[in-house]
Amino acid sequence: MQTLKVAFESYDGEHNIEDVNIINAEVKLIKFYCDGIPIDISFNQIGGICTLQYLEDIDRIVGKDHLFKKSILTIKAW
């Protein structure tokens, strides 16, 4: 995880990444800001993968230019 923190802190791309923190708890977490937007990434979570697959399946059923995914993202952003 420390290598990942160093990689984030030394990133020199088009986005501004700052305030990188690693939380070594039961659920490993890396928190940082990307262009002022807070980002949390968790590791080793099977539930997250299952949720992603479920959302992908529902999105395929709904269709309409990814209407379902766009709706979920809009609700989360709100």
Image (tube, rainbow, N blue to C red):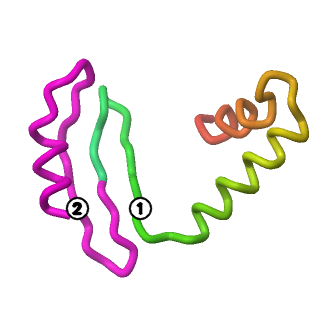
Going by the image, does 70 lie left or right of 12? right
The residue located at (27%, 45%) in the rendering is 32
- The three-letter amino acid code for the residue at tag 1 is Ser
Extreme right residue here?
61
Q: Quick check: is 58 in the magenta stretch?
A: no
Apparent side of residue 50 relative to residue 30 in the rendered image (left or right): right
Residue 37 at x, y percent in the picture: 37, 33
Are discs 1 and 2 less than 8 Å apart at CB?
no
Q: Quadrant of residue 78?
A: top right
Q: Amino acid at mark 2?
A: Ile
Q: Nearer the viewer, residue 49 or 39?
A: 49
Residue 50 sits in quarter: bottom right
State the residue position of label 1: 42
Label 1, label 2: how many angstroms apart (C-alpha)?
10 Å
Q: Secondary structure at mark 2?
A: strand
User: Which labelled disc corresponds to residue 22?
Assistant: 2
For the magenta stretch, what is the residue range?
A: 1-30
Q: Mark 2 packing: few (<14 Cα in 10 Å), some, or many (20+)?
A: some
**Which residue is farthest top?**
14
